[in-house]
Amino acid sequence: MRGESDDWVTLVANGILAAIVEEAAFHELSGPFTLDELLTAWLEREATTVAVLPDPPGSPDASLNQRRTYWFYEGCRALEDGAWIAEVGEGKFAVASLALLVAQLREESRQD
């Protein structure tokens, strides 16, 4: 079960990071971002994933809101642990290498 949980955390963390990079590229943002901004970007861009999130460990029959909240915070924790985001004060988070990630996204878009 733990391995499956880790897979979901990785999927969600990657989705959050990709969503905020897309948001930054689209709106010409450089951060820092609030948790609400991270959540909104993730929900807008990863709706399919959010819809199929499993119940949190030890919480059978969790509501969609409970599942979404649990996995979002686990994904954010993984991003912090991996040094992809860091709290910079006042509840805001900076994204490591955001300018580079945005540039890569734009380059990939030009190639498509």
Image: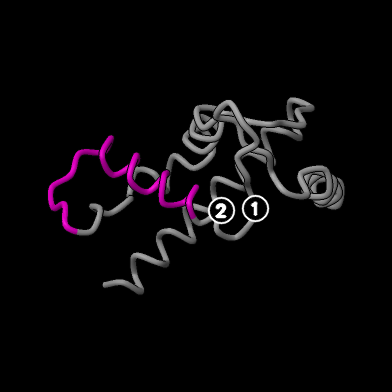
Q: Which of the pair 35/8 is nearer the observer?
A: 35
Image-quadrant location for residue 57? bottom left
Query: Are circles 1 and 2 on residues that touch, CB within 8 Å?
Result: yes
* Quarter of the rendering occupied by the N terminus: bottom left
Q: Is mark 2 on a helix, strand or loop?
A: helix
Please identify the dominant SS of the magenta region: helix
User: What residue appears at the point 58 percent right and 26 percent down from the top-left corner?
Assistant: 90
Residue bearing the label numbered 2: 79
Q: What stretch is highlighted in magenta?
A: 58-77
Residue 76 percent location from the top left of the image: 50, 47
Mark 1 and mark 2: Cα distance apart in space: 5 Å
How many numbered circles are shown? 2
Residue 31 percent location from the top left of the image: 71, 31
Asked whether 72 falls inside the magenta stretch, the response is yes
- Structural crowding at the residue carrying mark 1, measured as other residues with C-alpha within 10 Å and reported as few (<14), some (14–19) or many (≥20): some
Residue bearing the label numbered 1: 84
Q: Which of the pair 15/36 is nearer the observer?
A: 36
Q: Is residue 2 above or below residue 9?
A: below
Q: Residue 54 carries which label?
A: none
Side (left or right) of 64 relative to 75:
left
User: What residue appears at the point 34 percent right and 65 percent down from the top-left corner?
Assistant: 5
Q: Which of marks 1 and 2 is nearer the N terminus?
A: 2
Residue 69 percent location from the top left of the image: 34, 39
User: What residue appears at the point 68 percent right and 31 percent down from the top-left corner?
Assistant: 32
Q: Which amino acid does label 1 sit on?
A: Trp
Does residue 108 appear in the picture of this structure? Answer: yes
Side (left or right) of 65 relative to 73:
left
Q: Which residue lies furthest to the left in this view?
A: 61
Q: Is residue 56 above or below residue 69?
A: below
Q: Is mark 1 on a helix, strand or loop?
A: loop
